[in-house]
Each structure stands twice: as C-alpha cells, then as structure tokens.
Image: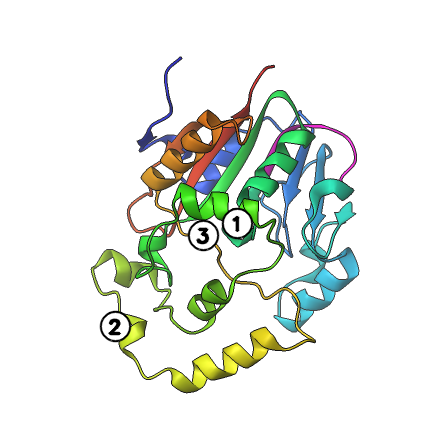
Amino acid sequence: MQKARSRFHVQAKRRGLVRSIQIVHRILEIGPFGNPTIRGNNVSYFDVHGTDELRARAVEHQHDPEAVPHVDFVSPNGDLLVVNGSFDNVFSAHCLEHQPDLISHINQVNELLVPGGRYYLVLPDKRYCFDHFFAVSNVGDVLQAHRERRTLHTLSSVIEGLVLKTHNRKKLHWLGFHGRPSWKLENIGKIKQTLNLFESANVGYIDVHAWQFIPASFLALMSQLHDLGMTALRPVQVCATPFGRREFTATLQKDQN
C-alpha cells in the first residue's frame, strides 16, 4: 500500500478539502463554533458549548448569531463519548492541537467512524502562527500525555500559549519576519500572573495549544502512532501548507478491520 506523503494538492486548502468530502454521507463536524465549515442535512455538530451559548458568544464578538448551527452533541470537556451513532466522515478545523490527550481524542473519533471512514483535519502550521519559535511535538510527548490521561493542559503549554508566543500574522512569517523569540522579552509579570491563574482552585480547563505541527512532522507522528498500535487511524494524505497560508490539511482513515 502506498504511504501518505506531505505534498501540494488541490485539497491543500480548506475549500478544496471540503469539496472532496461527500456530503451525502453522514458527517460529524467537531467545534463548528459560530461558523461551521460543512453544512447539509447529513451533518451533525459537536461542541463544548450549546447552541444558545454559541449564539451569545457570536453576538459578543459581533458575528451573526443566525449562522450558528444547532449543536447536536455538547460536552464541556470535549469528550466525544456523548456522541451517538456512527459516521462515514468526521471533520475538525483547528481542534486537534488543543487536545490535552491527542491519542484519546483520535481513538474517540475512531470509535465513531465506520470501517474505512475518514477523519478530515485542518491544522495550523506552527511556522506561520504564534507557535513559530516552539519545537514540533514528537511521539514521546504525545505518548507521555496519553500515559498521564491528561484532561487539562500542562503548565508548560499554558505559559507558552499565554505568554511566550510571538505574533500571529501569517504574511510576515512567510516573509521571514517572526518577531523576537519571546523568551528574550521581559515577561516576568505575565508569567507570574499566568502561574497564579494556573494554580487557582477555581480554574479548570485553560484553552491553549498542546501540540505544534508542520505537515511533515504530523505525517510522521500519525504514522508512528498507527504503527505502534496506538490508533487504528492512519494518514492517507497530508498536504503541504499552501504559500501565504497558516494552515494545512490532512486526512486519516480508519482501518477496514
């Protein structure tokens, strides 16, 4: 069987990827927020917020609340075990990198897919966003998180995500202007504030990136996890990040048996 490669493809952009998904099949979109990528009669939605809360958040951010879909399945901690039924395809955009336990999330998606079903992903390329100066995540990091059964982000991820990041202007990153490595800045006050937030008994989940990818590293990571038997989802396509963009696309497929 030919292995997936990181390459340019018509599906490298989000629009092209969505066009390749057969809407006639049953689809679950994870994290549509106020603007789902996929719409149709066969599409169900999962989010950490319910419909009314998402509409309120849309108004707060001056977005159209009428664009918010009806959310079929809600879990404040992102647990997909609340989802009923099976799906031919699952889709998420800028979701996977937020999962404290990446393997657990992938395996929950696997349980929802029919044999041969696909998980379509849109992921940030860490080189062209605020994660630029952070190292790509490796299989050891991912296995450690799964061993610890993480449901919350580590202090390291929270400090990086809230304090030690750089700018998020993709065009400047493509031009080679990445800002100053944030560890060179005077951030002691912000670090102390974030440390206090993290240690507060009243704070649960803090939403930051747990993982950083580029197309080649994501392809290697998912291939390793599949070959290790940690997941039945294997990469069948990982597209190179299109010029001037911040995100890349990937497709994982469930084994037939």
Q: Mark 1 or 3 closer to N-term?
A: 1
The answer to which of marks 2 and 1 sits earlier in the sequence is: 1
Identify the residue under disc 1. 145
> Horizontal and vertical percent for residue 31?
63, 50
Disc number at residue 211? 3
Marks 2 and 3 sit apart, C-alpha to C-alpha, by: 21 Å
Mark 3 lies on a secondary structure that is loop
Q: Nearer the viewer, mark 1 or mark 3?
A: 1
Note whether 193 is above or below 14 in the view shown.
below
Q: Residue 173 placed where, x, y %?
A: 27, 60
Picture residue at 57% right of the left edge, 73% below the top:
198
Count of labels in the image: 3
How far is mark 1 from mark 3, CA to CA? 11 Å
Q: Is residue 94 magenta?
A: no
Give the extent of the magenta segment: 83-91
Q: Is residue 93 visible?
A: no
Quadrant in the picture for residue 203? bottom right
Q: Position of residue 91 (x, y in %)?
A: 58, 38
Reading the image, the residue beneath label 2 is 180
Amino acid of disc 2: Arg
